[in-house]
Image (tube, grey):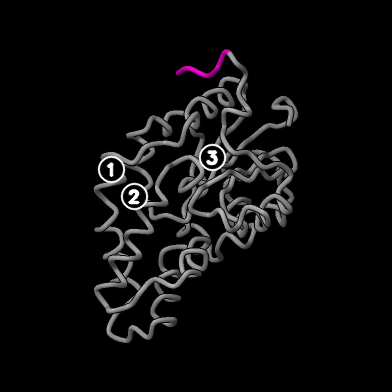
Amino acid sequence: MRIQDFEGAIFDLDGTLLDSMGVWHQIDVDFLAKRGIEVPDDYQKAITPLGALEAARYTIRRFHLENDTPEGLVREWLDMAQEAYSSHLPLKPYALNFVKYLKEAGLHIAVATSSDDALVRPCLERTGLMRLLDDYCTGSDVKRGKGFPDIYLKAAAAIGTDPGKTMVFEDIAEGLKGANAGGFYTVGVYEKANYRMHPEMMEIADEFIFSFRELLPDDRMAD
């Protein structure tokens, strides 16, 4: 990858820039336990590419939660996650350094996340990412999930970059597939919670990294 070959970068948030996957795993455990259900091994993989409402609809269908509504599930999940996002979830190592590096190199930058705006905006502001972004998109801005190119195309349009000149950073295979379908240059990002996807991600992505440190010049390691 040569940074000067690109005019934009689009980042997923959870598991890519933000070290948040452990929180969502615990929410899944606690939420389903209240209903007497253990978390299936494939559940988080199934819902991660989806927007909040679609994930809620999937959950209701899969577990036959006839007494729940999609809107009610989304509100329950948001209430469980709000404090972590607004107060203490950290960025992944070197994530902020790398975004600053791209910004100073003149690239246009967006976040494209399936998470709800009620979580995303406070988190972006608290971590210092908001001032570096040209725009951000959430799952509610598009009809289809991250297995499709919609959210990446919307983000690229928002920041005025051509997909072929825009990098997409993702920690899930479905996101990489969707970005590839949109004609983007894709970079798979290591996330320990998604280790089972890594072989597939390495095949799908144009590039795979274990840390943003790999993409930073030596003189950009410190904030």
- Residue type at mark 2: give it: Leu
Q: Residue 86 got which mark? A: 1
The residue pinned by badge 2 equals 119
* Camera-side residue of 145 and 48: 48
Q: Is residue 87 magenta?
A: no
Q: Nearer the viewer, mark 1 or mark 3?
A: 1
- Residue type at mark 1: give it: Ser
Q: Is residue 220 magenta?
A: yes
Is the residue 50 above or below the residue 93 in the image? below
Q: Is residue 123 left or right of residue 103?
A: left
- Label 3: which secondary element: strand
- Label 2: which secondary element: helix
- Residue type at mark 3: give it: Ala
Asked if the residue at tag 1 contacts the one at tag 2, i.e. Cβ–Cβ closer than 8 Å, the answer is: yes
Please provide the residue range marked out in magenta. 219-223
Q: Distance between the residues labelled 1 and 3?
A: 20 Å
Residue 72 % position (x, y) = 28, 72
Q: Count all numbered tags in the image, as a single digit.
A: 3
Q: Which of marks 2 and 3 is in front?
A: 2
Which mark sits nearer the N-terminus, 1 or 3?
1
Res. 124 image quadrant: top left
The residue pinned by badge 3 equals 110
Report the residue at 35% width, 74% height from top.
Answer: 38
